[in-house]
Image: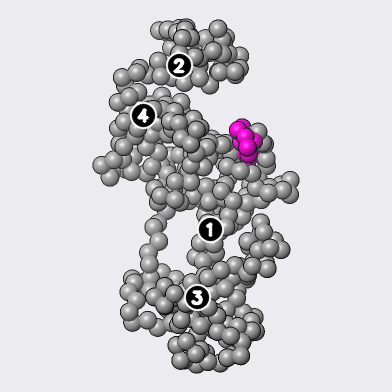
Amino acid sequence: EKGQYGPASELYVTEITDPSSVLDTVKARIQDFQGPGGIIDLMYSAIWTRGFDLVKKEATSEGGELPLVPKVFNSWLCSMELLSLLLRGIARGNVGIYSGDGTRNTSWDGACEIGLLSSFEKEQGIPVNEALKAPKVPVWILHGGDHFTLAWSKCLPSEAPGTEFSLNFWNGLPPGGPMLAELAVHAVKGAIVGKEAQPKFFKPEPGEVDEVIQADPADKAQKPNNYRSWRFEVTLAWDRPDLEGEVRGPDVPPEPKVDQEDARYQRSGPWRCRSCYDKRFQTGDFSLVPDESPDFCPKCNKTRKECGWSIWMPFADLPPKKQEMLMVRHAKKIEPILWTKWPAAEVRNTSGGELPAC
């Protein structure tokens, strides 16, 4: 019976030996694939076509695992191995830029016309294969870790910085869906072409923004979904002989410097001693200096100018690297996924609502 997939159910398998007849056969029963249980029919068809033994061998290569549909937290999830099987007929789930032996993963070259962007790139530091980031047609499967959604555009966007384009977005599953949305994307830095350069740690120079402590609680309460409008408490770097880091070469632009006493970033009342805050995990003291001691820190016995103090900067005034860090921290889940293709892009829902769940 159609739509029944219990342990005692029978499966009807049609073997097609003539490749030219495959499309006609699929068209003839397309309603079955689109109806209840159709996705299971599609899975069975792909597995039978590839062959059980070969699917098992491919799925467990390069660190992959079975089953193709694992059960996690009482939910059935689609694995990368199954997605690969459905996209290109091969059950190898490695969508990264490297193969298991460290060489470039060329298995996706010309294998699939649509693309894939994954949250794993930001979370695990594994760049997605270039062939999937830059597909032939402007369609990308978005992998949010435990869920797949879809984004597409009418044409391939330009890779130039400042490009603006629209993405249609579809989430077919509750609780975030079913939902269709149009996203306006401003690719301020353009698109990543090939492998993105991995950031290096350079020793901070005095005057650079060293650490972002927190967002202004009042700003967060007033505009909870608009982190770009918040002000942030930060400390500036100072000369630290004990801190090591690479030295910037002539081809590496310097980080912006900030004046500690810039009037725009000051606040009256209790203040945070930079020197004491740097030792907070050793002392267990996270408290502020009371406002009755505006020029001297009684905890480290230094003047305010000697020890330094935290200042409050709006998001727009922070250096780009700190902005990117905060964007990843406060962004909706869909944004960091899109940033793997369009770094630091500004994304908004054209309907004026919140960005969709991914």
Q: Do the residues labelled 2 and 3 touch (CB within 8 Å)?
A: no
Q: Is residue 51 left or right of residue 340?
A: left
Question: Marks 1 and 2, how far apart in space?
Answer: 41 Å
| Amino acid found under the numbered disc labelled 3 | Phe
Question: Marks 4 and 2, how far apart in space?
Answer: 18 Å
Question: Marks 3 and 4, how far apart in space?
Answer: 48 Å
Label located before the other in sequence (4 or 2): 2
Using the image, tell me which numbered label, if any, was put on residue 286: 3
x and y percent of residue 174 in the render?
Answer: 62, 34
Label located before the other in sequence (1 or 2): 2
Q: Name the residue under label 1.
A: 329
Q: Are marks 3 and 4 in contact (CB under 8 Å)?
A: no
Q: Mark 4 points at which residue?
A: 66
Q: Name the residue under label 2.
A: 45
x and y percent of residue 190 in the render?
Answer: 54, 54
Question: Marks 2 and 3, how far apart in space?
Answer: 60 Å
Indicate yes or no whether the magenta region holds residue 134.
no
Q: In this view, does 99 lie to the left or right of 182?
A: left
| Amino acid found under the numbered disc labelled 1 | Arg
Magenta-highlighted residues: 166-177
Give the label, 2 or 3, closer to the camera. Answer: 3
